Image (tube, grey):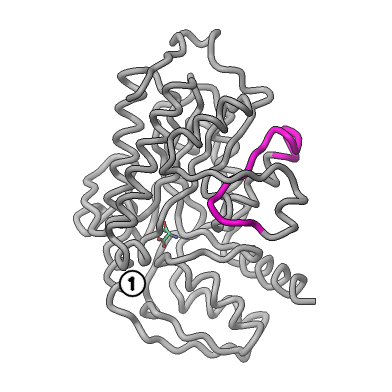
Amino acid sequence: PRQINRWPSNESSEPPTDSPRVLITGGLGQLGVGLAEMLRKQYGKENIILSDIRRPPAEVYNMGPFVYADVLDYKNLRELVVNNRITWLVHYSALLSAIGEANVALARTINITGLHNVLDLALENCLRLFVPSTIGAFGPSSPRDPAPDLCIQRPRTIYGVSKVHAELMGEYLHHKYGLDFRCLRYPGVVSAHTKPGGGTTDYAVQIFHDALSTGQHECYLRSNTRLPMMHISDCHRATIEFMQAPESQLSLRTYNIAAMSFTPEEVAEEIRKHLPHLRVTYNPDTIRQTIADSWPVRFDDSNARQDWGWKPAYGLSELVTDMLASIREKRT
Ligand code: AKB
């Protein structure tokens, strides 16, 4: 680490949590804008700064502060944290599973070097640091049904390897220096307003758009490939509730969170209750099918439920109803 400024470990001197000043990296991916919106409702617009290396659409500028931040540029990050009195960092910048396999060197740089930068920055500035992990942090030798929090993790993608590395580095720095590192393993996230990019679970978003536009979806996974999934608003709520949880409630620093598990066939069947004419064909592609086959089919999230009260609001039927309504609304 570049410099370590340690919080005293007794509870009474925890960093302030009532009004955090939050920086979100990789803010223009699937999750950043929605998380910023939810955080801004609780903590005020000016306290939540979204960042990315791309120029956002006008509506993002209008929603609240947006800045340029390159996770590979330590000085740029440090300047943002210092100038804006940041206390929480949400590190969303990463290349996902499928695109990572097509760009291994870039995935290694962004997912591992970028992570090292934010870990150092969090240590130096006593930040509460959230880094998402994923069902992709498990591999073919992990228990798959369900996958518990603590078990064998031997992923076979650079994405998975980088996420196991993030879990271990964060936990190591927590134990050694008291870094307030927090990590949730997300399932595939399903959202209407933002598209995922380069993941193995992306079909679970695309199928809704196809159902409403052409009525036809070609799925790159087999019909019976079961994966853990979650509605985006549950994902944001879990993240915020976990970030707000007092340290004393956390028996772990990395938790699985779950909501539902479904196959392409099952989600298609549920969509057909609203759109009976949906036609799905299956054309499994080798890379994504192999990745999906190595991932858990179900997540055991009992520790998150017990320690900090995690409870999802959306099951499959609520998710499908909401996705169709939200996409329809956006189209009109
Ligand atoms: C991906 O498919 O790569 C991501 C994930 C499950 O982490 N959506």
- Figure quadrant, ligand 1: bottom left
- For the record, the magenta segment spans 40-56
Q: Is residue 259 left or right of residue 137?
A: right
Q: Nearer the viewer, residue 135 or 22?
A: 22
**Place of residue 104 in the rendered image (x, y in percent of width and height, measured from the top left):** 28, 60
Q: Residue at x 65, y 85 (%)?
A: 213
Q: In the rendered structure, does residue 51 fall within the stretch colored magenta?
A: yes
- Per the image, label 1 sits on a secondary structure element best described as helix
Q: Which residue is mark 1?
A: 288
Displayed quadrant of residue 296: bottom left
**Place of residue 113 in the rendered image (x, y in percent of width and height, measured from the top left):** 33, 43
198 w.r.t. 299: above or below: below
Name the amino acid, label 1. Arg
**Place of residue 12 in the rendered image (x, y in percent of width and height, measured from the top left):** 55, 8
Q: Residue at x 39, y 37 (%)?
A: 254
Image quarter of the C terminus: bottom right
Q: Is residue 170 left or right of residue 323?
A: left
**Place of residue 16 in the rendered image (x, y in percent of width and height, measured from the top left):** 61, 18
180 w.r.t. 318: above or below: above
Q: Residue at x 75, y 40 (%)?
A: 41
Q: In the rendered structure, does residue 118 fall within the stretch colored magenta?
A: no
Q: Is residue 159 left or right of residue 181?
A: left
